[in-house]
Image (tube, rainbow, N blue to C red):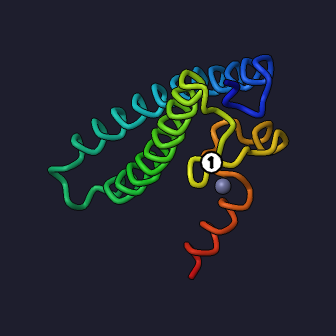
Amino acid sequence: MVMTALTTADVRHFEKNLQRMRVELVAELDRLSGSLDDVREARDGTQDDEHDPEGPTLTMEWSRLSGVHHEFAEKLARIDRALERVANDTYGFCTRRGEAIGRDRLEAQPATEYCIACARELEAERRR
Ligand SMILES: [Zn+2]
């Protein structure tokens, strides 16, 4: 039984995109972890001095970097889930109601879990 509306070649194509995105994200996360370490070290070095003008700047930089790190880690998790769906032959289907996701949408967002209709509904629910 063919589980997907996409051909095997299509799935391979999206799988390749996902793997490329994954490699880039892992490198980016590595860099961010390095930057976070640097900021942590710099901040720890200034902790004794309450009046150090660098203190608040470093705290802000820390918040910014850890926010980005968190965002990237979530993206990576989404990509891993998409690759799992490739392995399970369920890639290309909406994880909410199971309908096929449009190719254009997968081309733009290979890691997407939802078809456009579900994505819009979820977005509308979030805004409510
Ligand atoms: Zn859907």
- List the single residue furthest toward the bottom: 128
Residue at left offset 73%, top offset 23%: 11
Q: Nearer the viewer, residue 106 or 29?
A: 106
Residue at left offset 60%, top offset 32%: 90
In the image: residue 3, left or right of residue 81: right
Residue at left offset 73%, top offset 26%: 14
User: In the rendered view, would you say 76 is above or below 127?
Assistant: above
Q: Nearer the viewer, residue 43 or 19?
A: 19
Displayed quadrant of residue 126: bottom right
In the image: residue 21, left or right of residue 106: left
* Residue picked out by circle 1: 98
Query: Amino acid type of disc 1?
Result: Gly
- List the single residue furthest toward the left: 48
- List the single residue furthest toward the right: 104
Q: Quadrant of ligand 1?
A: bottom right
Residue 38, how many percent across, how many down? 36, 33
Q: Nearer the viewer, residue 83 or 90?
A: 90
Q: Quadrant of the C terminus?
A: bottom right
Residue 5, how many percent across, how many down? 77, 34
Residue 46, how many percent across, how many down? 24, 46
Q: Quadrant of the N terminus?
A: top right
Task: Give the class, few, some or many, for how many residues have Cα within 10 Å of label 1's Cα (few <14, many ≥20).
Answer: few
Q: Nearer the viewer, residue 117 or 71?
A: 117
Q: Is mark 1 within 8 Å of ligand 1?
A: yes
Residue at left offset 51%, top offset 34%: 81
Where disc 1 sits, the SS reads loop
User: In the rendered view, would you say 121 is above or below 101?
Assistant: below
User: In the rendered view, would you say 87 is above or below 105?
Assistant: above
